[in-house]
Amino acid sequence: MRRYPSPYATSFSFGPGPVSTALKAIIAANVVLFVGQIVFPIITDVLGLHPVFVIRALWVWQIATYMFVHGGVFHIVFNMLALWMFGTELERLWGTRYFLKFYFVTGIGAGLLTVFFSLLPVGFAQQLYRANIIGASGAIYGLLLAYALYFPDRPIYMYFVFPVPAKVFVAIMGGIAFLSSLGESGGVASATHLFGLLVAYLYLKSARLHPLSEVKYRYLKWKINRVRKKFDVYSGGRGADDWDRRVH
């Protein structure tokens, strides 16, 4: 006997869903290193992104490790909250493997572009050369852009008050990052946020234009259709003359 839900039953949910194993690992790594920063402050200097150290001392690991150190409680809390809110649905859409690849390519790419940007002979860029750039925001901004591309009209509550479409939200955040990058100060670089958006856009664009992507898509579609025929599975409804056809 089939049970029907009561019209008086109400279910509540918060956020995009449960935290996946991949997100748990990223969040755990950030939290562990943040605690380590409090106990051993030198971690911030060794793992934060110093363009001058990357160029002169070849501390190249910093273009990746800067993503896991933060400048304070609010910094890490908001970054991890954004990672959960936007990353969960994207990982569900892409799969864990592609999600992790996108996250690290975006974060590392943003760090690398920041190093190159700091070499430009202009004041607001040279301020970054000896700065200590920290935080996962480069990768987080990349996730924001991807979310806006896949769910452009999905409402996001800006400052938890004003609902705006995702595409508008990302445009506003990108504009703020651009204007802030012209007068850089402090350890968390707005230029890196902007580069996170740029790398994410180029990465997603190149994935769509890559010829192998189309080949993989066609092959996967052929394989799915072959499995459907093998098990007598048909998509769609049934026509007037299909009454004996099994539809699953």
Image: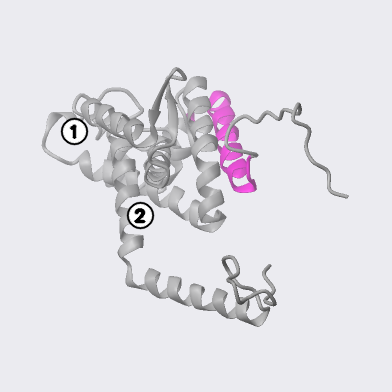
- Please rate how many residues cluster around mark 1, counting C-alpha atoms within 10 Å: few if below 14, some from 14 to 19, many from 20: some
Please tell me which residue lies in front, 21 or 70. 21
Q: Secondary structure at mark 2?
A: helix
Q: Is 198 displayed left or right of 94 in the figure? A: left
User: Quick check: 57 left or right of 47?
Assistant: left
Could you tell me how many numbered marks the image carries? 2
* Mark 2 neighbour class, 10 Å CA radius: few under 14, some 14 to 19, many 20 or more: some
Q: Which residue is mark 1?
A: 126
Residue 95 rendering spot, x and y as whole percentages? 55, 56
What secondary structure prevails in the magenta region? helix
Q: Which residues are magenta?
A: 19-42
The furthest residue to the right: 1
Tag 2: amino acid: Leu
Residue 15 sits above or below residue 204 on the image: above
Q: Which of the labelled discs sits on residue 204, or is there none?
A: 2
| Of callouts 1 and 2, the N-terminal one | 1
Query: In percent of the image, x 19 and y 34: which residue is there?
Result: 125
